Image (cartoon, rainbow, N blue to C red):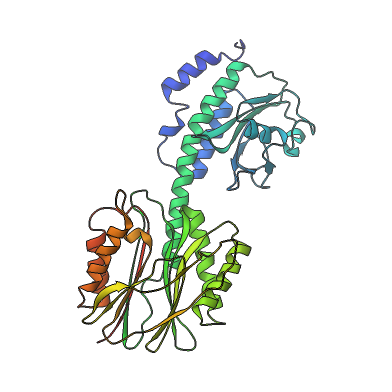
């Protein structure tokens, strides 16, 4: 069915042939520019007076105004619409085009729309592989009954737009996560007399997204050194943000106690309170003189190499990860670091490879650490060369080597 005023079939054909609605093939642009072009095209090609894009927040429970034309203040005022309520919320919940030919408080939740004098609205969901990205809608100041052809046209535009928006959001998230990782991962471990400390961090290049892996060394007021290697479950910006909160909290608690088990107990409470639903594995150690106390929150134990005795995994009982909804007493293990001893702590991205058992990677790591000789930084280089080589890792890798001078 086609309105004579809006020859949708002919306009759509011309638009597709000219690439006007081929949003997925737009040249790379900042997210704001992509959103602006989407609303401009939607308004022009549908002959509408207004157009707007609302994006789903991370919880997918709210829609937030991101771009608008012909509607003053919607973006500037941070309009938020709950999914399932109002016009845009209904489009998001039903995941299909929806039109209304009477805009008032009974049909539209956002007062800016009916206060602006909009009479009719047509909206379509922005979906990528079934995931709700947001809602695209257009409006008219004159009464207008949107046709089935209009709905089909707007949904086609929304499908193309969703791909472009998703690509921009993914790119922005990746760049932000990389920035966060680079800002919060120390370039070099602390310096400690009689010891060498070295580290490496590599993002999972194959996917191009960073996650929640991190390493940290902190010189405490007592002169002891806090050493940490951890892995927040998940990938991308969300995992990186959680990692920053976990790392910062652990540093703060280290000013009050230097017992690794107590540190992880306090960190557990922090995660359950401020990051509910998140999990992290953490190896936490405090080095005082030649005494190393450590505790594991579900994290792999480090590899230890001793002069004349080869290398093996430290006998460290794994307690539950941080963030698990039940609490059990955490344990601290103490060992003496002799001259020439080496400890290598890592995240599972170092030893896991697709199609291979982690035990194979672990045996290889033990073998490399057991070769001994050279500096801590040199050992890091050999480990990465042997374990990673020229093949991009499947997951993020954090590596920390502590070596006592011979």
Q: Position of residue 229 (x, y in %)?
A: 42, 69
- Residue sitting at x 37%, y 58%: 396
Along the viewing direction, whichever of 245 and 325 lies nearer the viewer: 325
Q: Is residue 68 visible from the viewing direction of this image?
A: yes
Quadrant position of the N terminus in the picture: top right
Residue drawn at x 23%, y 82% as measured from the top left: 307
Left or right of residue 365: residue 169: right
Vertical placement of 112 versus 400: above or below? above
| Percent position of residue 24, x then y | 43, 33
Q: Is residue 72 above or below residue 200?
A: above
Seen at 33% across and 49% down, the residue is 206
Location of the C terminus by quadrant is bottom left
Q: Quadrant of residue 333?
A: bottom left
Q: From the viewer's perspective, is 61 left or right of 391?
A: right
Residue 185, picture quadrant: bottom left
Q: Position of residue 308 (x, y in %)?
A: 21, 81
Compare residues 67 and 249 and report the one nearer the observer. Answer: 249
Residue 291 sits above or below residue 214 on the image: below
Q: Is residue 178 above or below residue 32?
A: below
Q: Nearer the viewer, residue 298 or 214?
A: 298
- Location of residue 214 in the rendering, given as x and y in whole percent from the top left corner: 42, 65
Q: Nearer the viewer, residue 131 or 340?
A: 340
């Amino acid at each position: 069915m086609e309105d004579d005023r809006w020859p949708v079939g002919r306009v759509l054909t011309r638009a597709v042939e000219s690439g006007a609605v081929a949003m997925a093939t737009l040249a790379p642009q900042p997210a704001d520019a992509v959103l602006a072009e989407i609303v401009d095209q939607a308004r022009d090609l549908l002959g509408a007076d207004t157009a707007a894009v609302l994006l789903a927040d991370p919880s997918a429970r709210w829609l937030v105004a991101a771009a608008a034309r012909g509607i003053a203040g919607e973006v500037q005022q941070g309009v938020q619409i709950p999914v399932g309520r109002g016009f845009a919320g209904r489009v998001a919940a039903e995941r299909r085009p929806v039109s209304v030919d009477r805009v008032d408080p009974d049909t539209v939740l956002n007062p800016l729309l009916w206060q602006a004098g909009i009479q009719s609205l047509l909206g379509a969901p922005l979906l990528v592989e079934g995931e709700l990205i947001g809602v695209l809608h257009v409006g008219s100041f004159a009464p207008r009954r949107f046709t089935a052809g209009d709905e089909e046209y707007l949904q086609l535009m929304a499908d193309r737009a969703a791909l472009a928006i998703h690509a921009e959001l993914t790119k922005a998230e990746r760049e932000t996560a990389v920035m966060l990782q680079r800002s919060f991962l120390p370039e070099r471990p602390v310096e400690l007399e009689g010891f060498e400390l070295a580290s490496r961090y590599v993002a999972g290049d194959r996917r191009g997204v960073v996650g929640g892996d991190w390493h940290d060394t902190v010189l405490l007021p007592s002169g002891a050194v806090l050493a940490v290697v951890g892995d927040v479950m998940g990938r991308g910006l969300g995992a990186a943000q959680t990692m920053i909160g976990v790392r910062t909290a652990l540093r703060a608690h280290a000013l009050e106690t230097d017992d690794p088990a107590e540190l992880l107990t306090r960190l557990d409470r922090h995660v359950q309170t401020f990051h509910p639903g998140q999990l992290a594995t953490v190896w936490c150690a405090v080095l005082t003189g030649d005494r190393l106390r450590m505790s594991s929150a579900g994290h792999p134990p480090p590899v230890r190499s001793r002069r004349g005795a080869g290398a093996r995994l430290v006998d460290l009982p794994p307690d539950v990860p941080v963030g698990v909804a039940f609490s059990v007493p955490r344990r601290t293990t103490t060992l003496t670091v002799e001259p020439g001893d080496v400890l290598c702590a890592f995240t599972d991205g170092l030893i896991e490879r697709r199609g291979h058992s982690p035990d194979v990677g672990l045996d290889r790591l033990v073998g490399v650490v057991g070769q001994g000789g050279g500096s801590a930084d040199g050992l890091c280089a050999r480990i990465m060369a042997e374990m990673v080589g020229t093949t991009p890792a499947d997951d993020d890798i954090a590596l920390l080597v502590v070596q006592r001078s011979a």
